[in-house]
Image: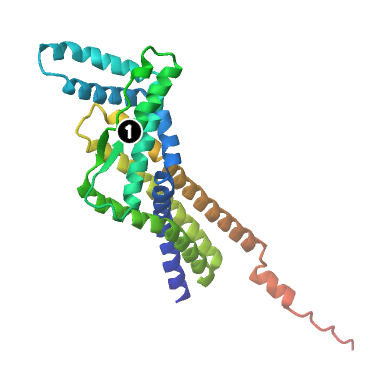
Amino acid sequence: MRDALAAALVSLACLLAPCGALAAWAAFDLADTGRYVSTMAPLSADPDVRDAVADAVGDGVVRELDPGPANSTIGPFVRDAVRSFTRTEAFATAWEAGNRAVHDAILRALRDDAATGRPVTVDLAPVAARVRQRLAADHMPLAERIPVRHTEVAVVPARELPGLRRGYHVLDTAAFWLPLAAVVSAVAGIAVAACRRRALTAAGLGTALGGALLAVAVAAGRRLTLADLPDRIHRPAAGAVYDALTATLRTASWLLCALGLTVALVSWLTARRAHRSAPGPRSASRTAAPAPPPRART
């Protein structure tokens, strides 16, 4: 009964460890605006991300133009101008400000249960103000005349907010309780086991297996995410964004593997050393046997 209970508790701990790492990553890494912005900031220098942004913005500007023969002539110049802008410091400023504005808006909507029936919108005025300030600092002509208008852009539809809000609350709660439950289950399983060293070895191997499965899940998630994109041209940019966002999760998975294997190896080595230093049955019987009495002389 003790071994069965210990096996159940250790198995539960090994199952909760990768789930706790996933919940903690979502709650404390993705849900933190500062960390999110610092993670996304280097992507402004990624060529694939720049090309994807230039194509999206250029197509949007061309669609706003009046249809006609001049549209096909101006379109390539507009796209080239946007692509050149993505290679400036002003684009890096706009990229950082835009990511911060979008993340703040989505996070406020997820935490505010009263905000129902309205989509998540982002005001582009702060982004335009940051870009104008950067261009003015670079002594760009007519930079001060760039208009700063309060333009609301919808980023999350209202129908998707209830599901996202429920998922956020579940992850926020699980980020604290799942790691704690994993540690408590592992300690209880090792304490209950008849052979604690063997239970510790099993817990280490199970934790390493959970970390490996988490790494496989991250890789599979990347493949499925890129496969669902309708536009194959922007898949390299989406892959760069996915890799940047899941870098901490991949590190956590490899840390679980390393920690589990280290614990299992140390436990196995100490068990072998204890087995070698223990006296054998023959030597124990020899030391325990009393000396024969001396023979009497006749």
| Left or right: 123 as drawn, with respect to 157 | right
> Which quadrant would the C terminus be assigned to in this image?
bottom right
Residue depicted at x 55% and y 64%:
197
Residue 119 pos. (x, y %)? 24, 45
| Left or right: 152 as drawn, with respect to 42 | left
Please name whichever residue, 46 or 33, is drawn nearer the observer in this view of the structure.
Answer: 33
Please name whichever residue, 217 or 179, is drawn nearer the observer in this view of the structure.
Answer: 179
Q: Quadrant of residue 95?
A: top left
> Which quadrant would the N terminus be assigned to in this image?
bottom left
Q: Residue furthest bottom?
A: 298
Q: Residue furthest left?
A: 68
Can residue 17 be seen here? The reply is: yes
- In the image, residue 124 above or below residue 116: above
Question: What crowding class fits label 1: few (fewer than 14 Cα within 10 Å), some (14-19), or many (20 or more)?
Answer: some
Residue depicted at x 54% and y 70%:
191
- In the image, residue 9 above or below residue 80: below
| Left or right: 110 as drawn, with respect to 210 | left
Residue depicted at x 25% and y 35%:
153
- In the image, residue 164 above or below residue 138: below
Q: Secondary structure at mark 1?
A: helix
Q: Quadrant of residue 98?
A: top left
Q: How is the image coloured?
A: rainbow
In the picture of the structure, the residue carrying the numbered disc 1 is 239
Can residue 14 be seen here? The reply is: no
Residue 51 pos. (x, y %)? 30, 22
- In the image, residue 120 above or below residue 130: below
Residue 225 pos. (x, y %)? 27, 39
| Left or right: 60 as drawn, with respect to 216 | left
Residue depicted at x 82% and y 84%:
293
Name which residue type carries label 1: Gly
Residue 85 pos. (x, y %)? 34, 18
Q: Quadrant of residue 292?
A: bottom right
